[in-house]
Amino acid sequence: MLNSIAISLGPIQIHWYGIIIGFGALLGLMLAIREGKRFGISSDFFMDLLLIGLPSALIGARTYYVAFEWNYYRDNLSDIIAIWHGGIAIYGALIGAILAAVIYTRRKGYDFWRIADFCAPGLITGQMIGRWGNFMNQEAHGGPVTESFLRNTLHLPNFIVNQMYIDGQYYHPTFLYESIWSLTGLLVLLWIRRRSFLRSGELFMSYFIWYSLGRFYVEGVRTDSLAFAGPQWLASFLKAIWSPMSSFGWGAMEAGKNIRISQLLAVAILLAAVAFIIIRRKQKSGVPYSSPVRTKLSNVSAIQGQLPQES
């Protein structure tokens, strides 16, 4: 088993979990900066956006998780801030980051959808790398499997197989499934963003469509899903959609809970993203992705510069 602690300096311990997430965020930032330069946007803008968005994402991710696991945390308040033990939710992170980005881009005078498009490849890159933090913590795994399945069916290297051996049982490496899906999604987004048909906001929505589709099916394998007791028709509907993946095993949930929150959100977000694209297309709103980016503040200044000056 790999050690989840990278560096120990007396009482201070630096976990691989944080290092990996930080590296993912840094690489995502580099992608956003590179794309922004094509449109004349300063790298400082994206660096400031990361400084605002990253803590907002962490707060949102932890708040989301704690809210759905409040029965535990209300009696263990000191554990609320212990994110190094895991327990953050990607959808909560997205909510926190998007809220911060909306506020920041508006204050800077940029159209949020244009900036979100530039950041989309960086977001999926951060998720692709960040899942390896779950690997180091031996968390967010799937249901039980045999060693033969990992070695002979998936042909995984020893370091992954050994890390998936937890408390006497091997488990599905769902972190790897999602990481590979995100890598494929990154390549898709990098290809789409150079297509002439793309309009503002659609690359960001494509990211949501791709990620939500993969997350829906991966979530059905996991054993640690946040879940709640809902109507049986909805649970049956979600399970029917997921049924083509039944060979991977349906992860266990607490008794009385039959709907996985992440699966339900994945379906809702995917449908909302598709609807967003269709409605905007019909309304002919949004500019081509390749259009020059001008801030509202710059447009105002340009107009003022054309007005006659008082003597």
Image (cartoon, grey):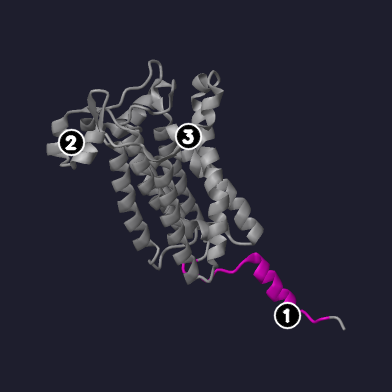
Could you say which quadrant of the image residue 107 lies in? bottom right
**Was residue 291 drawn as part of the magenta stretch in this picture?**
yes
Name the spot of residue 166 as percent of width and height, x first.
27, 27
Residue annotated with mark 2 = 150
Relative side of 189 to 153, left or right: right
Q: Which residues are magenta?
A: 288-309
Residue annotated with mark 3 = 11
Name the N-terminal-most of marks 2 and 3. Answer: 3
Secondary structure category for the residue under label 2: helix
Amino acid found under the numbered disc labelled 1? Gln
- Position of residue 117 relative to residue 98, above or below, is below
**Was residue 96 drawn as part of the magenta stretch in this picture?**
no
Q: Which mark is residue 306?
A: 1
Asked whether the beta carbons under mark 1 and mark 2 sit within 8 Å of each other, the answer is: no
Q: Quadrant of the C terminus?
A: bottom right
Name the spot of residue 148 as percent of width and height, x first.
13, 32
Secondary structure category for the residue under label 1: helix
- Position of residue 230 relative to residue 113, above or below, is above
* Viewer-side label of 2, 3: 3
